[in-house]
Amino acid sequence: GAGVSQSPSNKVTEKGKDVELRCDPISGHTALYWYRQSLGQGLEFLIYFQGNSAPDKSGLPSDRFSAERTGGSVSTLTIQRTQQEDSAVYLCASSLFYKGADTIYFGEGSWLTVV
Amino acid sequence: AQSVTQLGSHVSVSEGALVLLRCNYSSSVPPYLFWYVQYPNQGLQLLLKYTSAATLVKGINGFEAEFKKSETSFHLTKPSAHMSDAAEYFCAVSDNAGNMLTFGGGTRLMVKP
């Protein structure tokens, strides 16, 4: 596709349930990122994938959060046993390579509400 | 380590007035600097970026920003605000030392008719 695609665009889930959020990066982009945007916390880095290298998980807030990237393309962010504080917009992004000057392109986000 | 501070979480200007959104960064290595804009219910869109070439960077929609190393600043300006500029603006810093793109807290720009 022309841009980064995320699904679902909106998700309401009950506390304690697991959720999966999907990201399709721009075709040919080797780097993929997940960020979280929430009120009062701004934009937080969660995890980063670069090609076939081990992902940088340094931003994941707890072990309830995990992500994988299959075939160097599509990525899934999984949140287990969701809590109300997980309510946020989860933004996926991709870039051609990982170099500091590369432009990172963002999807429109998945709005997660935990009730 | 790197960080970004955006002074003013909300800025209000009149249509036609100068827009100035402030960004200061902290980085132990030469930085790359970015401004992104986020319209309501949309993702982030790149406005412009500084990558160690010209210090005055021109972006889309008439915005520009100037990298000032001595002031560790990268303020965003536009000579004349339009109603369509109302959005949230994020300054961000990255580098070639492996640090992830780090964002400031954002500034919501409101444009009054």
Image (tube, rainbow, N blue to C red):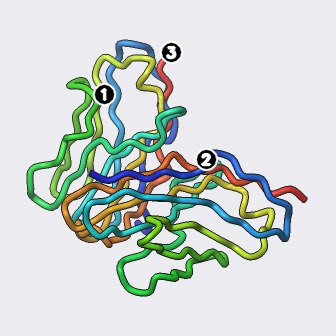
Q: Position of residue B110 (x, y in %)?
A: 76, 53
What is the chain letter for disc 3? A
What is the chain letter for disc 2? B
Quick one: A70 or A30, which is closer to the camera? A30
**Circle 1 residue:** A79
Q: Position of residue B9 (x, y in %)?
A: 63, 45
Vertical comparison of A61 with B55: above or below: above
Circles 3 and 1 on the same subunit: yes
Q: What residue do we see at 32% from left, 72% from top? A: A101
Q: Dot 1: what SS?
A: strand
Question: Does residue A80 appear to the left or right of A91 in the view shown?
Answer: left
Q: Dot 3: what SS?
A: loop
**Circle 2 residue:** B41
Q: Dividing the picture into quarters, in which one does residue B69 lie?
A: bottom left
**Circle 3 residue:** A115
Q: What residue do we see at 20% from left, 49% from top? A: A69
Q: Position of residue B5 (x, y in %)?
A: 49, 51
